[in-house]
Image (cartoon, rainbow, N blue to C red):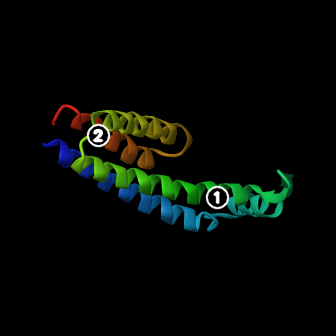
Amino acid sequence: MKAKTLLRIASILMLLHTTGHTIGALTWKDAPNARVAAVVAGMQNEHFRFMGRSLTLASFFEGYGFGMIGVLLLVSILLWLLSTAFNRRMIWVMGIFLIGFGVNELIFFFPFAAAFSLLAGILTLSALWRK
């Protein structure tokens, strides 16, 4: 497979990852049971002062979730752009980033999300040898 094809597949994988993450970010408050609902309520109701503002853990969680939507979308766009403007260093950096990101997801989140990032990272690094 050509490098361009590998990078575009990686880009589409990350776009699918972005879509899944967006759904999760928009529905995280929909608790599957009463115990989780109690945790979500606690995250939303317990305010604390931080850098001059009154915040909740829910606001941090939601803010990081929406921020990650932007990061994942940017990664998808960059992979697509790299497929047309081949840059060996940027592809190397992006591949290592995606592998690291996937390992982080595997440790702290869940295997389904990690699979998208890890596979995209492998495809990205594979593109270096397919030019």
**In the rendered image of this protein, does residue 54 appear above or below residue 89?**
below
Q: Secondary structure at mark 1?
A: helix
Residue at 74% from the left image edge and 55% from the top image edge:
57
The quadrant of the image that shows the C terminus is: top left
In the picture provided, is 24 more to the left or to the right than 84? right
> Where does label 1 land, which residue?
63
Where does the image place residue 42, in percent across and percent down from the top left? Answer: 79, 59
- In this rendering, the count of numbered labels is 2
Residue at 16% from the left image edge and 35% from the top image edge:
130
Whether residue 60 is visible, yes or no, is yes
Q: How many residues crowd around disc 1 within 10 Å: few (fewer than 14), some, or many (20 or more)?
A: few
In the picture provided, is 40 more to the left or to the right than 49? left
In front: 8, or 33? 8
Q: Quarter-wise, where is residue 121 in the image?
A: top left
**In the rendered image of this protein, does residue 70 appear above or below residue 107?**
below
Name the kind of residue labelled 2 in the image: Thr
In front: 17, or 70? 70
Name the kind of residue labelled 1 in the image: Gly
Dot placed on the residue nearer the N-terminal end, 1 or 2: 1
Where does the image place residue 43, in percent across and percent down from the top left? Answer: 75, 58
Q: How many residues crowd around disc 2 within 10 Å: few (fewer than 14), some, or many (20 or more)?
A: many
Where does the image place residue 37, in percent across and percent down from the top left? Answer: 70, 64
Q: Can you name the residue that lies furthest to the left here?
A: 1
> Where does label 2 land, which residue?
124
Q: Quarter-wise, where is residue 118 in the image?
A: top left
The quadrant of the image that shows the N terminus is: top left
In front: 84, or 7? 84
Q: CA distance from mark 1 to mark 2?
A: 29 Å
In the picture provided, is 84 more to the left or to the right than 122? left
Where does the image place residue 21, in percent across and percent down from the top left? Answer: 48, 58
Q: Secondary structure at mark 2?
A: helix
